[in-house]
Image (cartoon, grey):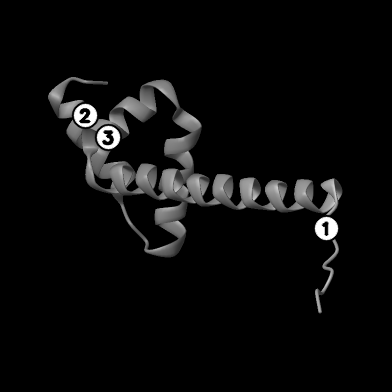
Amino acid sequence: MLVKKPQPTSYSKWIGKTLKTVFILEALGIAVSYGVYFKLNTERDFRLYMRQNYNWVLEGYYILGEKIADHKTRELDHKVWSSEGKI
């Protein structure tokens, strides 16, 4: 005997596609955020670029480092950039 299965409605297909898209975009956002954080954490020249173009991102990085790990990266960067004449 053949068993009839109900066909998914266009509404449920739309919800499924939307959820997949949101999940992919969220995963992509997390990956990009981690990549920027990793580059900020490892490259002083990238921090200088961010200071000149996206200062609010660098301030967030410094504040996060000071609150979580008590880093003095801000002061060290300022000393190095001043001695090199970049700022």
Q: Is residue 43 above or below residue 63?
A: above
Q: Do tag 2 and tag 1 residues touch (Cβ < 8 Å)?
A: no
Q: Is residue 33 above or below residue 47?
A: below
Choose top left, top right, bottom left or bottom right for residue 53.
top left
Q: Is residue 13 left or right of residue 83?
A: right
Q: According to the image, label 1 marks what residue?
A: 7
Name the secondary structure under disc 1.
loop
Name the secondary structure under disc 2.
helix
Q: According to the image, label 3 marks what residue?
A: 78
* Residue depicted at 64% across the width and 48% down the height: 22
- What amino acid is at disc 3? His
Q: Do tag 2 and tag 3 residues touch (Cβ < 8 Å)?
A: yes
Q: According to the image, label 2 marks what residue?
A: 81
Residue 64: x and y in percent read 46, 53
In the rendered image, the residue lying farthest to the bottom is 1
Q: Nearer the viewer, residue 22 or 40?
A: 22
- What amino acid is at disc 1? Gln
**Upstream in the sequence, badge 2 or badge 1?**
1
Choose top left, top right, bottom left or bottom right for residue 78.
top left
Choose top left, top right, bottom left or bottom right for residue 35.
top left
**Label 3: how many Cα within 10 Å (few below 14, some 14–19, many 20+):** some
Q: How far, Cα to Cα, is label 2 from label 1?
A: 64 Å
Q: Is residue 11 left or right of residue 17?
A: right
Q: Is residue 14 above or below residue 48?
A: below
Q: How far, Cα to Cα, is label 3 from label 1?
A: 64 Å
- What amino acid is at disc 2? Trp
